Amino acid sequence: MKDDVARARALIAAADNVIVIAHERPDGDAIGSLLALNLSLQRMGKGSVPVLADGLPRTFAFLPGAQQVTTRIPDTADLLVVVDCSDLERTGFKAGAFPRKADINIDHHPTNTSFAQANLVYPRAASSTQVLYDLAPRLGLPIDLDVATNLLAGLITDTIGFRTSSVTPAALRTAADLLEQGAPLADIYERSLNVRSFVAARYWGRGLSRLRMDGGVLWTSLTLADRRAVGYSGSDDADLVNLMTTVEGARVVVIFVEQPGGKVKVSWRAREGLDVSRLASRFGGGGHVPAAGATLEGALEEVQARVLAATQALLETTKAGER
Ligand code: AMP
Ligand code: MN
Ligand code: MN
């Protein structure tokens, strides 16, 4: 990994035109990492373009540099940096859509496939922005207030406000450092985790009305019809999965979000050290031990049956309390 850091530093130093990209259906860590790195590279005097396949969600439009995000990959670049993605396909683009191979991969997913020339993957980091913060001095990346704000946004959102098991003393020290540099913690928290639209709350209602629990597995679905009925414009679960994890007795939480074109996005959240990342990997996805996802082909009912059977099987082989 030391070699990879040195290699990444040299690649960054030599580059003039950079493409930075994060994952599809971006969360706060994908966006925070993308914008922090993009702004930092620009502060170094480099050209840099932040790309998101699905564009920028409205919730994160307040972050510094957010208006620079584009959905179009530039035709040329001398450096491609991929952040918060366990593999290149997570960007939402095929490898052929990029003008070059991935040069640098900055991530914290244990399921990362080390797909770039320099792979900076630290599974114990609470967020990809934590990785960026830790490596910034060695990569020669400057951190100003705007960069700090984006870094803190990634850390706050991936830890759901510092309450996941991934929170370490280092994560809290990073937050303290960023706060000291002026990053508005309370404001970021409020805007990215607390506030939701009326439409999103009604969308939750559709999912909650179908909530089911069976043998420690709590699940529900959100359909294309639900989105149409309430006028929700996103293709995600509006964070309903995190609300579901507050239900007592739920050892594993699963949500099925119907997508256009006969696909279903599945998200798992687990308690008690149960490993849902391997389950997700088996379905072509990935993630972390307690939080993972995958996109499956098939009709909602059929995907639901397949995934619930596999999830129940995981619970049966892992008795309560066992890891
Ligand atoms: P989500 O279920 O989308 O909230 O994601 C939970 C965790 O799993 C996050 O760390 C995601 O980056 C990861 N994840 C979700 N979907 C996929 C996928 N298709 N492939 C790899 N990782 C994923
Ligand atoms: Mn992410
Ligand atoms: Mn992340």
Image (cartoon, rainbow, N blue to C red):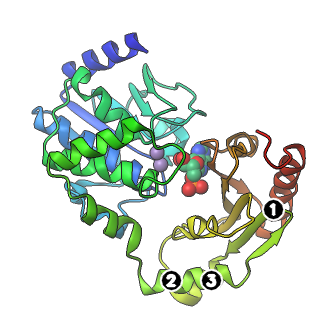
Residue visible at 19% across and 35% down in the picture:
41
Which residue does the image show at 75% across and 44% down from the upper left? 279
In the rendered structure, find residue 216 and report the number of the disc placed on it. Answer: 1
The Cα–Cα distance between marks 3 and 1, rounded to whole angstroms, is 26 Å
State left or right for residue 7 relative to residue 149. right
Kind of residue at disc 2: Ala
How far from the left and from the top, in percent, is residue 260? 62, 68
Q: Residue at x 37, y 59 (%)?
A: 55
Above-or-below relation of 298 to 170: below
Dot 3 amino acid type: Asp
Residue 297 appears in which quarter of the rendering?
bottom right
Residue 80 coordinates in the image, percent (x, y): 35, 31
* Quarter containing the N terminus: top left
Helix, strand or loop for disc 1: loop
Residue 113 picture quarter: top right
Q: Can residue 172 be seen in this view?
A: yes
Q: Nearer the viewer, residue 193 or 166?
A: 166
**The C terminus: image quadrant:** top right
Q: Mark 2 — residue? A: 201
Residue 225 visible in the picture: no
Q: Which of 72 and 29 is in front in this view?
A: 29
Task: Tell me the amino acid under the disc marked 1.
Answer: Gly
Q: Which of marks 2 and 1 is nearer the N terminus?
A: 2
Which mark lies nearer to you, 3 or 2?
2
**Which callout, 2 or 1, points to the residue nearer the camera?**
1
The residue that mark 3 highlights is 226
